[in-house]
Image (spheres, grey):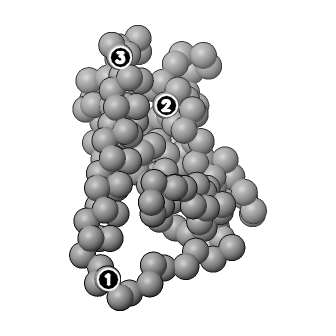
Amino acid sequence: MVAPAVDIYSTSYDGKYSKGTGTSSATAIVAGAAALIRSKYPYLPAQEVAHRLTATAVDKGPPGRDDEYGYGVIDLVAALTADVPPLGFESASAPAGGGPTTTAGARPGDDDGATARGLATLGVIVAAGAVWALVVRRRRRGDDPPPRISR
């Protein structure tokens, strides 16, 4: 699967922002999406979380999985709301308009602030990344120049 990774703004040195390109941003987006899905469906096994992401991705390139786009571009709204049959039932059709398929303790309408928890989880992930960046920066020797961001 693929996620945005070109011209992504992030925190930088001296309280500023910089624009970068690379897999680090895409990885953070996919991890945050997985955290939001796990927040909405807390008892969904990890394999089903990954299945929900790949089953709802927007297909690009040749139909189906391919070497350039994998299963497609991540679609977070679809991953959180679409009817996704559990693994092993990919050929079965889901009921139209029935809301997300329930699995392992998740019930339709059991939102109970799942979106807010998901956003809080995403915030924690972003904050942890910022702390990690500060630690790495402080460990860097003073005579090393900062890395250049390709444009």
Mark 1, mark 2: which one is toward the viewer? 1
Secondary structure category for the residue under label 1: loop
Q: Which residue is mark 1?
A: 142
**Which of the 4 image quarters holds residue 108?**
top left
Indicate whether 69 appears above or below 101: below
Mark 3, mark 1: which one is toward the viewer? 1
State the separation of the CA atoms marked 3 and 1.
45 Å
Give the left or right position of residue 122, taking residue 90 as reference: left
89 or 49, which is in the foreground? Answer: 49
93 or 105, which is in the foreground? Answer: 105
Secondary structure category for the residue under label 2: helix
Mark earlier in primary sequence (3, 1)? 3
Give the left or right position of residue 112, taking residue 22 as reference: left
How would you rate the neighbour count of disc 2 (Cα within 10 Å): few for under 14, some for 14-19, many for 20 or more? many
- Is residue 27 visible in the rendered structure shown here? no
Instruction: Please report the residue visible at 38 percent of the width from the left and 47 percent of the height from the top.
Output: 126
Indicate whether 43 appears above or below 24: above
The image quadrant where one finds the C terminus is bottom right
Q: Which residue is mark 3?
A: 113
Indicate whether 24 appears above or below 118: below
92 or 71, which is in the foreground? Answer: 71
Amino acid type of the residue that numbered disc 2 sits on in the rendered structure = Leu
Q: Which residue is mark 2?
A: 80
Q: Residue 105 appears at what percent x and percent y?
A: 26, 24
Q: Residue 14 appears at what percent x and percent y?
A: 45, 60
Secondary structure category for the residue under label 3: loop
Instruction: Please report the residue visible at 60 percent of the width from the left and 16 percent of the height from the top.
Output: 97
Extreme residue toward the bottom, this view: 143
Give the left or right position of residue 111, taking residue 138 as reference: right
Q: Residue 89 appears at what percent x and percent y?
A: 46, 40
